[in-house]
Amino acid sequence: MLKRLVLFISLAGFSLALKAQDREATEVLAHYFENTGGIENWRKLTTMRMKGLMRMQGMEFTGMITQARPNKKRVEVDIQGQSMIQAYDGEDAWWLFPMHTGPDPQAMPAEMAEGMVNEFEDDFIDYEKKGHTVELLGAIELEGIPTYEIRLTKENGEVVYYYFDKEYYLPVMQKSGVATGPMKGQFVETYLSDYQEVDGMMIPHFTEVKVNGQFVQSITLQEVDLNPEVDDLIFSRPKKD
């Protein structure tokens, strides 16, 4: 009887601890949405267009990224006078880069498509309805910045770690594992900085991507449009004549 009572008390204490962690994670996320424009404005965000400079492998390119609900995305980059397009219309991930694909758009390789197939809406909006869970893992210093570390476990089992700075509750980094391809098992770290206000919302204008701490690419935004008119056809693979 005593052993059962001790076990019950231990389990009850563990349950309360988990609820406290959930509550603290919820508080961090509430501050995050409040400080970046309000969750209702995030819910109203249906399209976004961003223009800027992309740097990788010692080269610099101009480019534009267009996104739309629920998960449509198009990336256009000017590489040495040639336009490379990567797009996803919600079902079909395709790309066009004459140097590699020839004159016609082709189905995107699986490892390349993985980075295109993402929900446009912030993962933390109504995360419980989506079947996701969040957990505050504690406080950690990230490159000299005190942060809160939150683990997001998505309904499909994917795990992403987010790091919010303690002062403004802005995400300064997110980390996730690579599931497929030659980099499988490695971690991709996306650093976010230079937050600027755009139509009442705080948008990071500098993004740097590293794999296991090694620089891969960066994007410096020069122009951001929220809720612009976007023709859905730009996401679909052009049909051959």
Image (cartoon, rainbow, N blue to C red):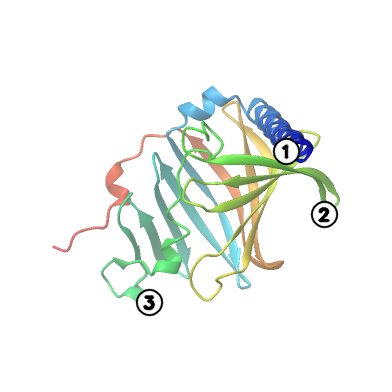
Mark nearer the N terminus (1 vs 2)? 1
Q: Secondary structure at mark 2?
A: loop
Determine the residue positioned at 76% across, 38% down. Answer: 10
Disc 3 designates what residue?
Answer: 99
- Mark 3 residue type: Met
The quadrant in which the N terminus is found is top right
Residue 5: quadrant of the picture: top right
Disc 1 designates what residue?
Answer: 4
Front position in the image: 241 or 44: 44
- Mark 1 residue type: Arg
Front position in the image: 83 or 42: 42
- For label 2, the crowd category at 10 Å Cα-Cα, with few meaning under 14, some 14 to 19 and many 20 or more, is few
Q: Are marks 2 and 3 in contact (CB under 8 Å)?
A: no
- Mark 2 residue type: Glu
**Can you give x and y, in whole percent of width and height, for residue 231 in the image?**
30, 41
Front position in the image: 231 or 208: 208
Q: Is residue 79 above or below residue 51?
A: below
Mark nearer the N terminus (2 vs 3)? 3
In space, the residues marked 2 and 3 are separated at their CA atoms by 39 Å
Determine the residue positioned at 67% across, 34% down. Answer: 22
Disc 2 designates what residue?
Answer: 143
In space, the residues marked 1 and 2 are separated at their CA atoms by 46 Å
- For label 3, the crowd category at 10 Å Cα-Cα, with few meaning under 14, some 14 to 19 and many 20 or more, is few
Query: In the drawing, does residue 55 fall left or right of residue 87?
Result: right
**Can you give x and y, in whole percent of width and height, for residue 158 in the image?**
53, 53
Q: Nearer the viewer, mark 1 or mark 2?
A: 1
Q: Is residue 13 above or below residue 174?
A: above
Front position in the image: 216 or 34: 34
**Can you give x and y, in whole percent of width and height, for residue 113 in the image?**
41, 62
Q: Nearer the viewer, mark 2 or mark 3?
A: 2
Q: Secondary structure at mark 1?
A: helix
